[in-house]
Image (cartoon, rainbow, N blue to C red):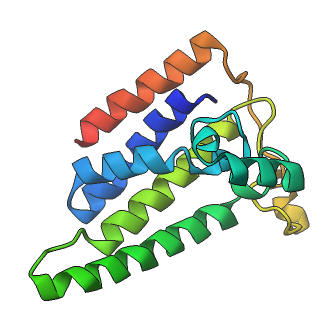
Amino acid sequence: MTGTTHIAGGALAGAIAGHLTGDPVVGTVIGAIAGLFPDVDHPGSLVGRRLRPIAVLLEVMFGHRSITHTVWFCLGICLLVGILAGIVNGFLVPFGIQGLSVSLISMSVGAGALSHLALDALTRSGIRPFLPVPLPDPLRRLEHIHGPLTTGNLLSEALVTSVCWLLALYFL
């Protein structure tokens, strides 16, 4: 999927997380940004162009849709951002400033990043969400998840993007 579709999917996931934690508007914005995070391993992606040295390094070391397209990466980024949000909130309290809820931030980041995986799983290339952990036989079919869509196909991208934005508006 393209960056535009990942923004829409992240916005939807963030809106749901925000709805659950009390601020769907903030959740939507955070989720939309976090929906781009897994593509940090691709120098041509929206986030990869802004963090080019990291993107080039990750692409050379691991390739695209590998380590950053796993549930472990999403959980790690969620945890890291949650810790950073807690630290920032701790610095704001003595000044009488109310920071954003750590649960709102971390849930929206996690949901947005996971939405990226879900959308890429719809493509023919698919993802390997549990790399490098081998799954037991009953779960082996989850090692490589792929669907019927082609990345960049105008009709597929427009349809998925539109559905995500409409559902996100519902949660707002």
In percent of the image, x 77 and y 39: which residue is there?
126
> Where is residue 146 shown, x and y percent of the image?
77, 37
- Comparing 102 with 56, the one in front is 56
> Where is residue 5 shown, x and y percent of the image?
52, 29
Quarter of the image containing the C terminus? top left
In percent of the image, x 66 and y 14: which residue is there?
153
Horizontal side of 128 relative to 81 (left or right) equals: right
In percent of the image, x 12 and y 83: which residue is there?
95
- Comparing 9 with 96, the one in front is 96
Above or below, 108 against 89 in this view is above
Horizontal side of 94 relative to 135 (left or right) equals: left
Q: Quadrant of residue 76?
A: bottom right
- Comparing 68 with 92, the one in front is 92
> Where is residue 78 shown, x and y percent of the image?
51, 67
Quarter of the image containing the N terminus? top right
In percent of the image, x 64 and y 43: which residue is there?
48
Can see residue 55?
Answer: yes
Horizontal side of 73 relative to 90 (left or right) equals: right
Q: Residue furthest front?
A: 53
Q: Residue furthest bottom?
A: 94
Can see residue 128?
Answer: no
Q: In this figure, what is the number of numbered marks?
A: 0
